[in-house]
Amino acid sequence: MGPASRKHKSSRKYAAPHEAKPPRYPQCNPSITASAADSGVAKERPSSSSPTMAGGSEAMVQELPSTPTLAARMAKLAPLEGLGCEVAAGSLMANREREYKSTNKLTEGRRPIYAIVFNFLDVRYYDVFATASGPRLSTYRCLMNGNFALLQGYLDDNNNESFFTVSWSCDIDGNPLLVAAGSTGIIRVINCATEKIHKSLVGHGGSVNEIKSQPLKPSLIISASKDESIRLWNVQTGICILIFAGVGGHRHEVLSVDFHASDIYRFASCGMDNTVKIWSMREFWPYVEKSYSWTDAPSKFPTKFVQFPALVAEVHSNYVDCTRWLGDFILSKSVENEILLWEPITKEQSLSEGYIDVLQKYPVPDCNIWFMKFSCDFHLNQLAIGNSEGKVYVWEVQTSPPVLIARLSNPQLKSAIRQTAVSFDGSHCIN
């Protein structure tokens, strides 16, 4: 998948060895002021200053290795430069505009809605989506007439909880699990079949900004946290398997993570240190397998630290708050009013030191505050992203140059749209 191939010049930009350095703080207000589908007063996100690593984990963490097994690579790429070729930029003129209409509106109290997600794991639930707002989680089903029906609601015991992320998983019997976390750093795993809490995963030392399920093994999830770490969990057993942090890890809040769709070992992460990192779990996969047969207490599992990513890319010069795989390419968004599509080539894949190639950019006006995330349909044909003015831009992802399909707005909605959710076939866009 991806845009049409283009002829490159002979010059290449290669990655240089990674050197740790303090994060660069952007000149923007890192607080959330409004929400998707909420016309009420929004609550500020917790402060992002001085996050600390988790110290209260229940897991038994092994010693940090003294010698890295995989050296991190820092790809220093100037803005709008690829491998000697011009970046294909999309036009804000919607020349293939489709007809969209607003079919329903629902306000969930006066708290921001930070997360909306469709269930792509089970064909029975492709038309079901979940939302996260304050201490409340809700699930809905899209109806044939364009409306949607409330299926379930969950209210956390802690009224001070503010859920920032929600994702779908499933148990060994195929029952849907709802996985959510937020300001408290506690990950709740809810069994939608029994309507009971399945697990509460404790370990992060700060708020959790995003959770993603492994599409090839949905009982595995990764969580991105304010404590600068990423954790791999087995939701079936409640075990924290791997912690991605340390010398080569993020130097500020981790804001977004995403698993590769076909490579079970790879995932990408991004955050407030302005970088996108690609990680490999191949070397540590025996720990994953061990987590399924572990019979002792989860706190006694030999959780492993992973310090070095396969690639560290400085594609943006500001906070990077959303990243998604597009085949072997990566889509990433910063607070710079644009989304970039680029190709990472790690040292494992290349005879060189690795490099990155920026291919396309998708402009998004009025999108210069953080925690505004895009979504795609299952086949990665359409991308929807909201902005601070209540508008939604729908892009055709796999054309070159990018094509703006539609620019959506509602006169009654003027607040920032923090998250969108595009349905399995792209027929619905929730924001």
Image (cartoon, rainbow, N blue to C red):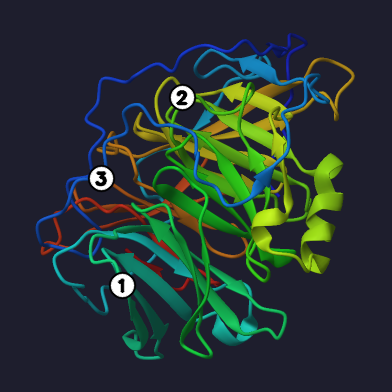
Of pointers 3 and 1, the one earlier in the residue sequence: 3
In the shown orientation, is residue 83 left or right of residue 164? Answer: right
- Residue drawn 17% across and 52% down? 43
Determine if residue 316 is in view.
Answer: yes
Q: Which residue is mark 1?
A: 157
Q: Nearer the viewer, mark 3 or mark 1?
A: 1
Residue contact between numbered discs 2 and 3, judged by CB atoms under 8 Å: no
- How many numbered circles are shown? 3
In the shown orientation, is residue 154 left or right of residue 275? Answer: left
At numbered mark 3, what does the secondary structure look like: helix, strand or loop?
loop
- Residue drawn 63% across and 67% down? 235
Above or below — where is 74 with respect to 158? above
Above or below — where is 71 with respect to 382? above
Q: Which residue is mark 2?
A: 273
Q: Between residue 115 and residue 4, name the one nearer to us.
A: 115
In the rendered image, residue 256, in percent from the top left (x then y), is placed at 49, 44
At numbered mark 2, what does the secondary structure look like: helix, strand or loop?
loop
Of pointers 1 and 2, the one earlier in the residue sequence: 1
Farthest right residue in view: 351
* Amino acid, disc 2: Asp
